[in-house]
Amino acid sequence: MKKTGAQILCESLIREGVEVLFGILGGAVLPIYDTFPKYPQLRHILVRHEQGAAHAADGYARATQKAGVCMATSGPGATNLVTGIANAYMDSSPVIAITGQVARPFIGKDAFQETDITGITLPITKHNYLVTDASELAKTVKEAFYIAQTGRPGPVLIDIPRDVQQEEAEFAYPDKVDLPGYKFVSRGHSVQIKRAVKLISKAERPVIIAGRGIIISQAYDEFKELAEKAQIPVVSTLLGIGSFPGNHVLNFGMLGMHGMAYANLAVQNADLIIAVGMRFDDRATANAKDFASQANIIHIDIDPAEIGKNVPIDIPIVGDAKSVLKTMNKEIESRNHLDWLSQLEQWRSEHPSLEIRQDDELLPQYVIRQISEVTQGDAIIVTGVGQNQMWAAQHFVYTKPNSLISSGGLGTMGFELPAAIGAKVGCPEETVWCVAGDGGFQMTIQELATIAQEDIAIKIAIIDNGYLGMVRQWQELFYGRCYVDTKLWNPDFVQIAEAYDIPGVRVKHREEVIPAIQKAMDYPGPFLIDFIVEPEENVYPMVQPGESLSQILELPKPEAVSRY
Amino acid sequence: MSNTKHTLVALVEDKPGVLNRAASLFRRRDFNIQSLAVGCSEQPGLSRMTVVVGGDSAEVEQVRKQLDKLINVVRVTDITEEDIVTRELALIKVKATASTRSEIIQIVDIFRANIVDVASDSLTVEVTGDEDKVNSLFELLRGFGIKEINRTGRIALTRGGI
C-alpha cells in the first residue's frame, strides 16, 4: 500500500518501538508533524530549543536503554542539535536525530534554511543518512535504529528533504538489515579470555576499572560475580558509576582527576588492571604515560578501535562485556586478596576523600549527601558539568544500577535539565533529580517551559555558588586566583521557576536542607531548590592536569585553610 | 617498524559520500595520510581504496581500525608486510627544445615510459611504476625543466593467491 514519506517515517518509528519524540517543528518537517495526529501512539514533546531535544533524547536513551529520538527542522533547527549529537557520540548513547531538509530541487542552492547537516555531523555520528527517495525511507530507519543500538551504541542522523516527506512510495518494513560493512564482535576470543583468566589467577594486586560499557551491556550480575569471586577491588570511571553498587565492600569509588585518592592509589600500585567497557579517557587516566605503570592491562571492550588507543594493552578482549564476563566467570577461580584489600582500606582511612569539612556555610557536598540520604539512593541523578557534577558523582551513594546520567566525554554544561526531562519521560515511576550548577542551568533554562507544559515531575537542585565554579577553581589553583569572568550575576531562580508555574524554595542554611528536599519529594510535580552554597568551595581530591594519578591534591587540613 | 609507510587496502561501498567519510576521518583524527586512490573493484557496488599512511605500527593500526568502523567500509587490510604489487601513474610535462628533445626521449625509453603529447616547447610523459621509479624519472627530467606534473596515489594488490 502506498504511503507518503511522512507516514512511512511514523509507521517505521512505531515498528521500532518508539513512543516519544522530542523536537521542535519548522518549515522542513511540517509534512511529518502534519501526520502525527494519525499516529497517537507517538507522543511528541515540544521543547524550547533543539539542543534540549537532543539532550532529552540522550537522557531518555540512557535511562531506558533504548534509542531516544529527537527531531528538528532544516538549517538552524538541525545545527542546534549538533551539541547534543556530539554529546551522545562521546558517551555512546543511541540517539536518533531526524532532521528536515529543503526539498530536493533546492539542495545545494543555498536555499532558505538549508544546511549540510549530514556533512556537519559526519565526525559526531556513528552514521548518517540523506534520504533522497521515499522508497528508501523504511530501510533507512531500520538501519539507523540497528546501527544506533547495537555494538558500541551511538547517534545516527536521518536527514529527510521536505518533498521526500510528501512523496508517495510502497511501504513494507524490512525484517532485517543488509549492512555488509557493519560488524561487531559480541563473544570474546576464547584464547584471549583464557590468557586473561591466567593473569587474574596470578595477580597479587588486581584492580577492576568499571566503565559505562557494563551498563550498556547490562552486565551488572556478571560483573559483580567476577569481582566477588576473585575478590578484586573495583574502581569506576565517571560514567561507570552505577555499574556496581556504591555501598559494596569491594567498591572503592571513582578514579581519575577528581577520583578518590585511594582509588587512584590502588590503580597506580596495581599489578593487574582489568578494564571493562571503558576507554582510558584522559580524565580517568590522568597522564597516560604514568598510568598504572606496574600493571599488566586486560581491556575488555566491544570497540576494537579503543584497544591501545590511549594506553598500551597486554591482553585485549574485543566483545560485549556481558558475554565476555559470563565466559570468564566460568573459569575464574575463587581467590582472596586480603593483604591488598587491607592496604586499600588503609589508604581509605589515611585519605578520607569523602570527608566533608566543618564549616558554618552551606557546603555543596553536604547538599548532595542529604539528597542521597533522603532518597536512600532510590533516584536517577542527572548532573550538569563541573563542580556540581563531581560532587554529585562523589557524594551520592549509587546503589541502583544505571542511576547516574552525566555528560562525561563532551562535558556539556546545560545537559542536565533537558536530559533529566528525557530520563523522567522514559522512566516516569522513578524519582529524577537534576543536579545543576548555576552556570549550566542558564544554558538550557528555557526547558522549564517544556517541564511546565508537559508537567514533568523532576526535582531540580541548583548548586548555586555564583561562579562558573570549576573554571573558578582552576583560576584559583593555576592562574593565581585571578577570577576573570567567572563571577556570575544570577537572576532569582525561585522567582524564575514561579514564572514558569514551578514551585521552588531557596536554601541557605544546613538545617533547611533536609526539609527542602523532603518538600520537593512530597510535591507531586516539578520542584526547584536553589541551594546557595559556599562560593569558593573546591572539588577535592584533584589530580592537576598533566600530572600522574599518584599526584593527588587533597582537601587542605584545617590549619592550612587560611590559604591566602 | 617505526615510521614506515604502510599500505592499507579497503573495500568500500560505492555510495555517495564514502570518500568524504574516509577523508573526514583522517583529518579529524590527525592521521598522516600520504596518498589515497579509489576506483571500482571486481564486485559490483564495491570500490577499492588504497591508502598510504605513515606512522609506527600502533598508529597505523588505529587508522585501520577507525577506517574499518565506518559503516560503508566492508573490509580493511594492511598489506604492507605481504607480497604486493604497487603502482603509481604520473603525467609529467617537461620543457623540450630541439636540442634536448632526443635526450628526453632516450630517458623515457629507458624507463619504458611513453610520450603522450608533443608540443613545440614541451613533451608530456606518462610513466607507470612503483613510487621509486616515478621519483627517479622525475629527478632525471627535472634538469630539463618541469612545467607541470600530476600523480595518482599508490594502488596495490597482493600477488597471486585468492
Image: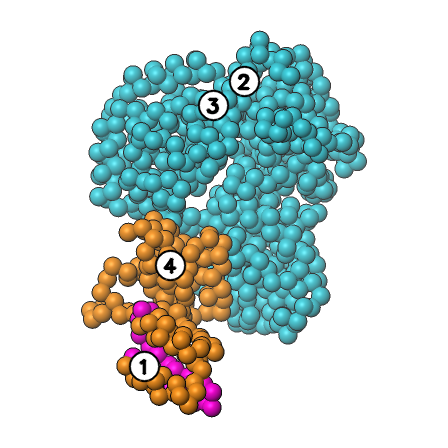
Chain colours: A cyan, B orange
Mark in front: 1 vs 2:
1
Subunit of mark 3?
A: A
Task: Indicate yes or no whether the magenta region holds residue B131.
Answer: yes
Q: Would you call the spot at circle 4 few (<14 residues within 10 Å), some (14-19), or many (20 or more)?
A: many
The amino acid on which the numbered mark 4 sits, given as a three-letter code, is Val
Which of the two discs, 1 and 4, labels the residue nearer the N terminus? 4
Q: Is residue A545 left or right of residue A192?
A: right
Reading the image, the residue beneath label 2 is A555
Q: Would you call the spot at circle 2 few (<14 residues within 10 Å), some (14-19), or many (20 or more)?
A: many
Reading the image, the residue beneath label 4 is B53
Query: Which residue is at 54% across, 12% downward?
Result: A557
Seen as rendered, the residue at the extreme top is A559
Reading the image, the residue beneath label 1 is B107
Tell which of B17 and A471 is nearer to you.
Answer: A471
Subunit of mark 1?
A: B
Task: Judge if badges 1 and 4 mark residues of a common chain.
Answer: yes
Reading the image, the residue beneath label 3 is A552
Subunit of mark 4?
A: B
The amino acid on which the numbered mark 3 sits, given as a three-letter code, is Ile
- Labelled pair 1, 4 in contact (Cβ < 8 Å): no
Which residues, given as a range, are shown in magenta?
Answer: B111-132
* A475 to A424, vertically: above or below: above
Counting from the top left corner in percent of width and height, residue B78 is at 30, 59
Subunit of mark 2?
A: A
Counting from the top left corner in percent of width and height, residue A19 is at 57, 50
Tell which of A259 and A57 is nearer to you.
Answer: A259
* Quarter the C terminus of chain A occupies: top right
Query: Which residue is at 25% across, 67% downward?
Result: B84
The amino acid on which the numbered mark 1 sits, given as a three-letter code, is Ile
Q: Disc 2 on helix, strand or loop?
A: loop
- Labelled pair 1, 2 in contact (Cβ < 8 Å): no
